[in-house]
Amino acid sequence: MKYRIPLLLLVIIAFINSLCAQNNKSWSLPINDEIPYYYKDGVKMNKQHSSTLLLANLNDEAIGKTPEEMALNWITNNKELLGIRNTSDLYIRYTRSSLSGNTIRFQQSFNNIPVYQSEVVVHISPKNKITYVYSTFNPAITNSSTSPAISKENAFQVAQNEIKVSGKILHSENKLFIYQKNQTGNIKLVYRVIIEAESPIGSWEVLVDAQNGEIISAMDKAFYSKEKDKHPNQKTVVNGTGNVFNPDPLSFANVAYAGNYVDNGDATNAQLDAATLSVTLLDIDLTAGTHKLKGPYAEIQDFEAPNKGLFTQATSTFNFNRFDDAFEAVNCYFIIDQSMRYINQTLGISLMPYQYATGVRYDPHGLSGADNSHYLPSSGRLAFGEGGVDDAEDADVIIHELGHGLHDWLTGGSASSSQGLGEGSGDYWGQSYSRSLGQWISSDPEYQWFFSWDGHNPFWSGRVTNYTATYPSGLTGAIHTDGQIWATTLMRIYDILGREKVDKAFLEGLALTGSSSNQQDAAIAVRQAAVDMGYSCPDINVFTQEFTATGYVMPPLNLAQFPPVIADVVECATGIPATIIGNGNSLNWYDDFALTNLLQTGDSLNTGETNQGTYIYYLKYSDPACSVAPADTVTLTINGLPNINLGVDTTICDNYVYVLNANSFNSYLWQDNSTSSTYTVDGNVTGTGTFMYWVEVTDGNGCVNRDSIVVNVSICTNVNENATNNISIYPTPTTGIITISMNSFVPNTKIQLIDNLGRIVLEIIPKEELSVINLSNFSKGMYSLTIQTDSDFMVKKIIKK
């Protein structure tokens, strides 16, 4: 049942929140980062300068030897379009290579001073096509003073005084920029001062006029989960264990916030303990006998109050309950580590913080205990508050803040908050993880809840991913509210296409955006990334339909450029009919170029073919929306199995060595797991008996076949290496002809000639007393001649000269 809050309590909470929301904001002069724009023929244009802000769905040939050269050549050839007079005003600030291609970010500068939030982003697809360009280049920066009148130190002091810094300064930056607010105001030379201190909490950016020391703006640039209220020893890594909420106790137990499933001042109980999960903490640091929650993807730090330490210990077992402060530290490590491993290892997207070279740094107990959490873009760190439900107990909060970091790292420091893009991106990334666990079904209200444990309770209302507002009419100006439009849209696509497809497109697309990008820009970028990664026509159509349904205006796409590409298939003739697997979409399969003989409709084709040969099939999307997409061909090649023959079953003496030869293949596996091309059967070792030997060979096509042979090892009491009374062999050595003479014909006699590799090169069954063998065409060397009757076994060494 739902927990109902008394109306008076709601009023009191709202009043307190309104007071908290004013904290530290009396001096905050927020900047609207978005440049005024309009659309011309579907292209986003700079309203002040009529230069292009965004171009998507391009297909321009990239010219140059490197991605950087390709990008600069494109800018040079299209500089008038972007309002650029001289490309010498640009320098490469950030490059990224990933699944969707290469992204090059050029920073605008004047007299070697960077221009605030002015860049050109060029994206090159894996096919070496320029497909997407985003620009906030400011054409007005042609003449500006670059000599400051006040010192760097003075500017820093002015900034400290403005935001009333107290306590230790944890991180700071101070650099000159040329600044023009939204490319419409006066052009100024400013010091951009960044301060992260014990107080005020946040990552404060203060712009100080470098000529007169006036404050242009002072703004907390940290990204919050909610509306803002208030090395010398030898190291190694080991796996540890710990208790976590995954993603939270309510989702894990499928219960509502009520009864024993409430915060209750951070107290634990049997039900909440049962909702924890014992997990492996991968690759934690072990130094001088001390285990620390530090690994390749996550690292605990203690940089904000309340300072509760790093929770190091002598054991690798971190089994705590939620009453212990160490619980949140473990929970954070596990959730951040899992998300970063998923990105880097499962999705194959290389993504780490650019501010430092370690795993993601986090403080599980920060913000002076407030009921909020934030990402600090200047230092690239996360911190989590303790008010209400401890934020670090809820994976939604942890991954939301990590999502802000991902946005920052993907764009090289150009993450946008415009229209709640950053907040919605964090919500999507968190919901993507929680929904992947499959703990709620789509008919449950909680299926759409975000901040399921931290919110949707008396502390605050949380957020949802089935927000009904559309774009742009539903924008309120509150970034946390508006971000729900973006997150809701992405989750609709997620439910259609699945987690990994949408996650890849989301991350790769976000990497194309810039500091002034809005939700519509991001939608265009995400779809462009999907196109550049080779998504199918039906998949691209889902992005287009859902983005359009929300209200984002999407540039038209030529669906004819998306044939249903499927890689050719090579199989081996195993006797099982070959199946061709499609690309996850429904296809029509044909065996004729005219597409008249429909074989099958579906994602895959059971060809029915088992014989060696080459077969060609034709396919088109069955989705009517993609009917304009051309047909594609797929070739099925069935290779024959390797021809392996160990020879006929044979008998050898117990003092004889017999070599089995598998001939020339790529690899071998014998019955005893040996892997050479030959196998020696030594009667002296095996003793008498009947033995089966087999070998499995693999050829150059990867096809596998097997053969076996039975070798009978007998006691040969009548063996005579030189001669017997009944059989004689001459001459030896020989240059060609040898004669085998028996005093009398013996039925069932078998004569075999074996080379020094153990191969039977000749076998005859004599029909009279005298047998003549011509060895003229045989190679020179030593041979073994075996003569076997029902009562005798003779081995004779033969030398061919």
Image (spheres, rainbow, N blue to C red):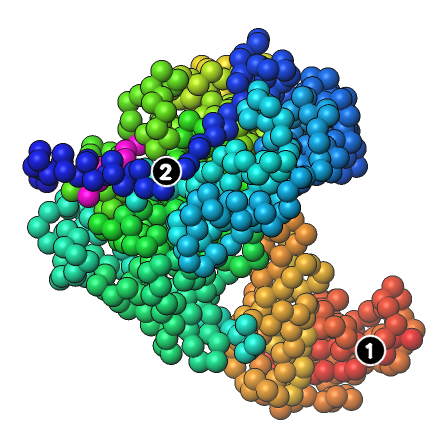
Quadrant of the frame with the N terminus: top left
In the image, 173 versus 207, the foreground residue is 207
- The secondary structure making up most of the magenta span is loop
x and y, in percent, of residue 649 in the image = 59, 69
The magenta segment: 459-465
Q: Is residue 603 left or right of residue 561?
A: left
Residue at left 82%, top 70%?
A: 772
* Residue kind at label 2, given as amino acid type: Lys
Which amino acid does the dot numbered 1 rest on? Met
- Quadrant containing the C terminus in the rendered view: bottom right
- The answer, for residue 389, to whether it is visible in the render is yes
Image mark for residue 25: 2
Q: In this view, does 248 lie above or below 542?
A: below
| Residue 462 lies within the magenta run | yes
**Side (left or right) of 149 relative to 511:** right
Query: Which of the numbered marks, if any, corresponds to residue 573?
Result: none
- Which residue is at a point 22% across and 49% down the rendered structure image? 388
- Mark 1 or mark 2, earlier in chain: 2
Asked if the stretch drawn in magenta spans residue 482, the answer is no
**For residue 121, above or below residue 686:** above
Residue 511: which quarter of the image? top right
Left or right: where does residue 183 sit relative to residue 267?
right
The alpha-carbon separation of the residues under discs 1 and 2 comes to 98 Å
Give the SS element for disc 2.
Answer: loop
**What residue is at 71 percent from the left and 77 percent from the top?**
786
Secondary structure of the residue carrying tag 1 is strand
On the image, the x and y values in percent for residue 704 come to 58, 54
Q: Give residue 351's position: percent from left, percent from top.
A: 54, 48
